[in-house]
Image (cartoon, grey):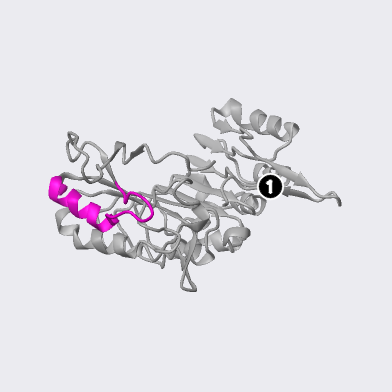
Amino acid sequence: MRFYDHLEELYGLPAFTFPAPGETMKLPEPDAVAWRIAAQGYGAEETWESAFGRFCAEVDTTRVRALIVGLWEDPEDTDPSGVIKALLSARDRLPALRSVFLGDIVVEECEISRISQTDVTPLLAGFPELEEFGVRAGEGISVGETLRLEFPALRHDALRRLTVQSGGLPVNVVRGVGASELPALAHLELWLGTSEYGADCEAADLEPILSGARLPRLRHLALRNSEIQDEIAAAVASAPVVARLEVLDLSMGTLSDDGAAVLLSGQPLTHLKKLDLHHNYLSEPVRQRIHTMLDPTGVEVDLDQDDAEWDEGDDGTVRRYVCVGE
């Protein structure tokens, strides 16, 4: 998967890009779309903050329900601190805001591994009624400073959906999410990535999430895009949270027969509505075993190999690749 296209919807609303300066068009009703606000690229005369200022002047922001933060001026060298500050400054003008996605930046604008990020939790603290939050993150460099995503532990009583997309998620983010009190969270999606692009967590770091102790309403768990997908599958096999899930997603990573075998030998998965393992490295016998176990119970199973690629070295060592890295 590469990010060739911008988000098409958010919070169940179609995405609509707020016009650039000088563009004239009829604007939709404020609560009918997810508004995408973006700078116009590197060297653009208008900053993201200026575009947001025009948006606030032209749209009845009291009715806006979803915001998509697109490209800021230079995401390789600049984190979105200014974006976050602008949103927080306008919070009194956004009483209906329920969903934010930070970093809808596609590959032609910036590779995911190079998207600078920062501590995003002030957005959650500043919008206590936010129900959905998503962020796309890599690792930028500015004057020798690494600009990485941070997510220190917090409590948020309204958040129902949390998505973190990355080609290499720092362990501190995983631990921060796991230590957070999110009593309303029903959907958690983490793209863990590969060590080549900054991922440094181990399966043990997921234990607070897999215990489910702080996530009483979790029904959809996605631990995706990981180079340690076999180890994660083994941890999931006995995880207490699985018994209450409707969707288990271990897709986009390097899952092999070894990980699948441990997963299938663990606790029952027949209560699930869906098991998503797409982009995998499973053999045909293991695929058939999964179908034989789960198809009769009505579980929807996605075993599409997608574009999974592997290399074999001269010594016979096989290297498998996650779906999204660079």
Left of 82 or right of it: where is 142?
right
Q: Position of residue 50 (x, y in %)?
A: 23, 56
Using the image as rendered, state which of residue 191 and residue 231 is in the foreground: 191
Q: Which residue corresponds to mark 1?
A: 259
Using the image as rendered, state which of residue 180 and residue 101 is in the foreground: 101
Q: How many labels sit on residues?
A: 1
Q: Is residue 127 visible?
A: no
Using the image as rendered, state which of residue 153 and residue 254 is in the foreground: 254
Q: Residue furthest bottom?
A: 144
Residue at (74% x, 35% y) in the render: 283
Residue at (22% x, 40% y) in the render: 23
Residue at (41% x, 58% y) in the render: 75
Q: Residue furthest top?
A: 296
Left of 263 or right of it: where is 105?
left
Asked if residue 49 is among those painted magenta in the image, a careful observer would answer yes
Q: Is the residue 87 above or below the residue 141 in the image?
A: above
Over which residues does the magenta segment extend? Answer: 37-62
Q: Position of residue 304 (x, y in %)?
A: 61, 32
Which SS class for mark 1?
helix
Q: Position of residue 147 (x, y in %)?
A: 45, 67
Left of 30 or right of it: where is 214?
right
Asked if residue 39 is among those painted magenta in the image, a careful observer would answer yes
